[in-house]
Amino acid sequence: MIDLSTRYLGLDLKNPLVIASSGLTTTLQGVQNCANAGAGAIVLKSLFEEQINADVTALTNASVDFMHTEALEYLEGYGHACGPHEYLTLVRDAKQAVDVPIIASVNCITAERWADYAAQLAKAGADALEVNVGFLPNSADLTSAAVEERYAKILQTVKSRVDIPVALKIGPAFSSFRPLAQRLGTGPQAADALVLFNRFYRLDIDVKTLKVVAGNPYSSQDEIHTSLRWILLLAGKIDSDLAATTGIHDGQDVAKQLLAGASVAQLCSTIYRHGFVQIKTILAQLHEWMETHNFTRLDDFRGRLSQSNSEEPESYERLQYIKGLTGYE
Ligand SMILES: Cc1cc2nc3c(=O)[nH]c(=O)nc-3n(C[C@H](O)[C@H](O)[C@H](O)COP(=O)(O)O)c2cc1C
């Protein structure tokens, strides 16, 4: 008898498939579709800090004029969540309608006023909060140290305002990710989970019209490697749970992330591509893979291939060794 249950963010999940924050989870119907197809947990579409602050200061919808350009681009590219009041209703309704954990999501660039709203999300019944730090450090005087400080401050502020678990979803573009992961993922103020890595809204150029346009919003399976590497390297070394996101498209991809040490795998593009039934398909693939290897529980193999559990930890980093393995010069 195969048991897919797992713990994530201190919650009991019936399986490790978490539906990523996206247009799939903007409505109650979307949430129900995910749950009916067997999701282990559901992250609601993100509310944007600017939406929350605009509401707090009682500005009307015309307040989009005040938004940061990159937030606006993200909104346009990824679609709007409903407003902050409706979002609380969505959390309440989702909790009533389905029996899987509901994780609210906020996309923020600062730790300012919106943090008070986080407490309301908890009151509305959210089982946890995922904080997606989504700013583009494109100012000439913003140093790496200041950027990292901002991440730590956001986490600290949110953790001090809510008593539900907090996951921090971040992108991969840091020059020295290990110390940052250590800082965000250890000690009393640690994130309850790090979600690695966000796939930010992409830009492209249309060479026919000579215009900057939206890039492909959906990942390919080949994009799994960045998060896979960092989960291999971090598992067992920090206190936070690790959630994998980007490029996870089938049951084998989920197995890889669990072998690396992830607590859960978040799914998005593959569901856009194949429909909600893909959740069922991936569960069946994971089940079958476990059967083939005589695993009955996720803990039979979770983290087995992480650097922490390796007898040759240097092989995860030494370029020559990797060249030797791949045969590439
Ligand atoms: C249409 C669309 C909307 C998204 N909206 C959000 C969002 O509001 N908040 C967020 O944290 N991530 C958002 N994402 C990112 C996904 O949650 C996910 O991290 C990313 O797509 C990588 O996973 P994938 O390779 O499975 O697609 C969105 C992705 C897509 C495709």
Image (cartoon, rainbow, N blue to C red):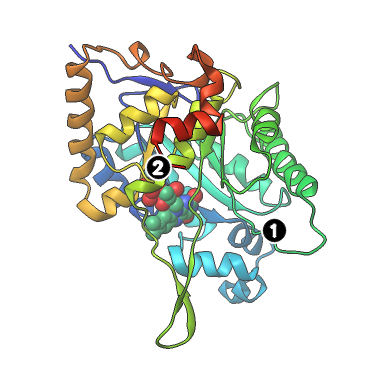
- Choose between 14 and 73: the one closer to the eye: 73
Q: Amino acid at mark 2?
A: Ile
Q: Considering the numbered disc 2 on the image, is that residue within a helix, a strand or a loop?
A: helix
**Farthest residue in the right direction?**
141
Residue receiving disc 2: 224
- Label 1 with label 2: CB-CB less than 8 Å: no
> How far apart are labels 1 and 2 at the CA level?
24 Å
User: Does label 1 point to a residue whose CB lies under 8 Å from ligand 1?
Assistant: no
Drawn side of residue 186 relative to residue 84, left or right: right
Residue 145 image offset from top left, x and y in percent? 79, 45
Classed neighbour count for the residue bearing mark 1: other residues with Cα under 10 Å, few (<14), some (14–19), many (≥20): few
Q: Which mark is residue 137?
A: 1
- Choose between 150 and 124: the one closer to the eye: 150
Residue 140 image offset from top left, x and y in percent? 79, 64
Q: Which mark is residue 117?
A: none
Q: Is residue 304 above or below residue 77?
A: above
Looking at the image, is mark 1 or mark 2 nearer the viewer?
2
Classed neighbour count for the residue bearing mark 2: other residues with Cα under 10 Å, few (<14), some (14–19), many (≥20): many
User: Does label 2 point to a residue whose CB lies under 8 Å from ligand 1?
Assistant: yes
Q: Do we see residue 28 in this rendering?
A: no
Residue at position x 79%, y 52% from top?
Answer: 143
Residue 104 image offset from top left, x and y in percent? 49, 43
Q: Considering the numbered disc 1 on the image, is that residue within a helix, a strand or a loop?
A: loop
Q: Amino acid at mark 1?
A: Pro
Drawn side of residue 147 relative to residue 218, left or right: right
Q: Do we see residue 119 in this rendering?
A: yes
Residue at position x 39%, y 37% from top?
Answer: 327
